Every structure is written in structure tokens, then in C-alpha cells.
Image (cartoon, helix red, strand yellow):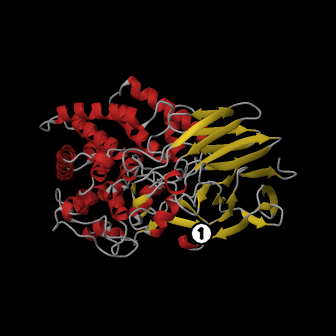
Amino acid sequence: MVAAEETLAGQFVALGHTWPKRDPSNLFPAELWRLDPATGGLWPGSEHYCFDIPYRHERALGDIKCVWEINRLQFLQPLAAKVALDGDGGGAALAAVETAIQSWFDANPPFRGIAWNSGIEVALRAISLLVVSSLVGERLSGATSSRLRSILAASLYWLKRFPSRFSSANNHLIAEAAAEYLIGLAMPDLAGAAAAAAHALRVLDAEALKQIFPDGVPAEQSPTYGAFSAELLLVAHEVEPIAPATLKRLDAFADFIAWLADSDCRVPAIGDDDEGFVLAVGVRSGRYAADVASCVATIGERRGLKTFATGGYSVVRHNGWHLVFDHGPLGYLSIAAHGHADALSFTLARNGRGILVDPGTYLYHAGADWRDWFRSTAAHNTLSVSNANQSSMTGPFNWSKKANVRLETSQPGETWRLVASHDGYEASFAVRHRRSITTEQGTIIVRDQLIGQGAPRRAEISFQFAPSLEVDVGDIDCRVIENGKAILAFQFSAVGKVMLHRGGEPADGGGWVSPAFGKKMPASRLVWSGEVGEAGVTTLIKPLEGNE
């Protein structure tokens, strides 16, 4: 009940920010729902029609996601659970639930202010209120129940009126359909509720088959967004069973996560991750994707090589190595909103220790240059030609030219081998990047080639290390240091310049990892740069004696 006690003490932490602590006697002042925790500024309120607020281009007030986060009202779920589980001695939790709903209701009339200008936010708030109502039940006062019904009725109307379309028809659409479905089932007396629920169920089943590939890979190329969609589907299924084909797709997703997850049940930070969840137990776990997958199927040991050909990932678990190779598309739908320019990147762990990692997400709307850096090719464990991106960014969630990737070889066995290539540099540099990864006597062998009329070309090959590791750049090889001990050696076959970055600005080629939304920490990034000739560049990754 830690999360409930923190709320009762006036504390709220999310997305890397801590909100100003509030006095327990005034937990939910009206300005709370508009307050940005980073800038202290107040976003426009109920005097504005929701769609008249230009949140996409506002910077001085902060990142709209922070304000949206508290307006999801998910912090009420642990309070309601406390009421249901331990009787809420003294009644503080129940009183807080009722006060919060009244305050939010008064400050956010339907369709006014920033709390109503995003369908996914409306949906998640509605689901949270339904969870609260189901846990607290008849203990809610008549006035609170009436307010709650008014919010849900307005939410259903708004979700039906403005469904996500075009580039937002991704996880947003699943969230909106889940909310419509659940409201329709919970409030059948509402006009059109039955029809809304039936329509929403059809959308859920259809979108599950679109947004989770048959091999289990989420179409948005983000394990955590896939888990978010899976959690929404599971919540809907708990209320009323969903289609067998949808459950089969969820089983495939669980298998994909089981292959991806390390020994600590954490998955690589591929693509975007804004720490979204549906059912709240406090701050979201770093094992979120595995937690959701485990609700579908038990996560057990996997060994060998498995290729998820449709989604575009290959995973190797062999002789202590855990390698995830990305040969998938940039992302989902026309603008691939949550994708990163990470084609042919790979992450690597050794005996349960993270070595090469995905840099993560950091920020969305308020990220500016940092948003671009964490999505860039240079920030990932892959090759870039002349520091250019494989795919072209045209906004914080937009891509124009997209690299197309082709898996050429997936060979299992003791000397497993993976080969893939992409065309992201063909138009600008007349070359195709091909990468092969294999193993020999416990060593990982990575070969990068540039093929085409434009070869040879100057290129950079990046390796982003976990924050806990240091790297010593020597004359012959580079040593990876953990707790003062060298555990791995990186050796390059071609003559070039080898540089080490840690921290710094994006424009200077920094080394950073974002462990959670809104947070970043310096981490060593090793970069080989030089001319990639006909033979390509081979990188050997060798365990050192005593670390085999």
C-alpha cells in the first residue's frame, strides 16, 4: 500500500518528475490538474475549448505529457484498492478518492481544457475510474457516483465522436476502444452503450491482429508499447472474453517477450517508451513488458536462435550470450511515430550482464534536440554513413524517407549466423548497409559492409554501453571494464579512428542512456570511424580470461 500512502501524504512522481508536495488537508487543489511540475507553469484551463490549446508547439510551459499523466487519475487505483483490501481504517483513502473526483470534475467540465484534447488520455482516465468504481463499489457517496457517471458518459460520447485516425491509429486506438467497450458494459443504460460496446469489441479484435504481428512482434517496434496494448486487451478480456484469434496473438507476443527478456526480466529499450500502463500499483516496473507477458503465459527459458521474421527481430541465447538483432521496419503506419532509426542495431548481454544497450527514449514534446538524438542512427549500435540517419525525421513523431530492411540469412546451430541489409543510404550515398553477426569459439563476430556503386564510403560504427561499464581505448583493442575488472575486448579489423564519448551534447556525438522517461544518464559510447572498403569492417567481441 506504499503508493496509496504516498498519495495521502501529498506526493506524486511520474515521468522523471516530482510534483510539489501538497498538504494532506488540501490534496487536490484546482490548479493541480494544470500544473507542470518542471516549470511550475499552469496550462490553459476550462476557459478554453480543448482543441484550441496548441500543446504540440508549446515549450515554455513544459511537456504536456506530465500534465496529462496526473489527469489519468491512475493514482486513485491504489487508494481504491486500500479501501477494498484493508477496510481503510479512518476513511482517509475513501475520502481522498471522493475529493479527487470532485476536484477534477469541477476543474474539467466536458471538452474544456487540456484534459480532454487527447483520446488516449480520455480513455485511460475512464478505465481508471471504472477500476476505482469496481473496487470501492457502494461505499462511494451518491454525489461522487453521479459525478463519476457524468465523466464516463461524456468520455464515451467524446471517444465515439473523435476516434484516433491516420498516424494515431496505433496503441491510441486500442486504448480508446477498450474504454468504449468497458464503459458500454458497465453503463448499459446509457443511450447507445450496447452499440458502442459491440463496435469497440470489433475494433479491439481487428487492431490486435494489425498491431501484433503473427510472430508476436508489436508493429510499433517497441516492446513496451506492445505490452501496453496487450495489457489493455487483457483488461477487456477479464471483463468479457475476447476472440480466440486475439488470444492467440497475445500468446505469440508473450513468446516474443520471453525470448527478448534478460535474466532479470528486462527487455531492450527498443523504440519509444513513455512508461504508460493501465492498472496502477505505483511507479511502473522496469519489468513491465515481462510482467504483462507473464499474465498471458509463463515466461520460461529459451535457448538457441529464434527469428521473428514478420516483426523483424532475431534473438540468440547461446553460450552465455543474449543478443537481440533488429532487422525490422522503422515503425507502424505512415509516419512510424514511435520508431527509431535503428536498423541493423543489436543489443548484447553476457551471463546476465547488460553490455551493449539501446539508448532509450528520454522525452517527447519537450525533448527538442534530445528527442532527435535518442531516435538517431548514431545513438544506436549500428553503422551510419557520414553521420547521416538511415531514415529522415520530419518532426518529433514523424519520418519521411524510411529505410527498408531485408533479412538475408538466419542460420541456427553452434555457429549460428545472421545477415541482414537495408537501403537507407542508397538514395543519398548509393550504398546498401549489410551486417552479418556470427560466433566462433565464444567470440561474437560482427561484419559491416557497404555495397553499391557509391562504395567505399566513410562511415561510423557505434557501440552504446550500459551506464555501469567503463571503456579503455588502447592501441590494439578496447577493453570493457566492470567494477575495475576487464571483462571484454573489442577489436576492429580496419584502420580507423576510435573515439570514446560519455555525456556531452547531441551535436558533439554524446554518450547517453535513458533508463526511464524524463531521465538520462551519461554512458560510454565507442565509435569507430573511417573508410569502409570492399572487405568491410569486422568487429570482434571477445570474453576475457575468467569471464568466458
Q: Nearer the viewer, residue 81 or 297?
A: 297
Percent coordinates x, y for residue 428 in the rendering: 50, 57
Query: Label 1 belongs to which residue?
Result: 510
- In the visual, does 527 lie left or right of 165? right
Q: Residue at x 77, y 63 (%)?
A: 483
Q: Nearer the viewer, residue 435 or 374?
A: 435
In the rendered view, would you say 440 is above or below 366?
A: above
In the rendered view, would you say 360 is above or below 129?
A: below
Percent coordinates x, y for residue 68 in the rendering: 33, 60
Q: Could you tell me which secondary element the residue under label 1 belongs to?
A: loop
Q: Nearer the viewer, residue 227 or 151?
A: 227
- Farthest front residue in view: 453
- Farthest left residue in view: 191
Q: Residue at x 42, y 66 (%)?
A: 11
- Residue type beneath disc 1: Gly
- In the visual, does 294 lie left or right of 177? right
Q: Is residue 68 visible?
A: yes
- In the visual, does 535 lie left or right of 335? right
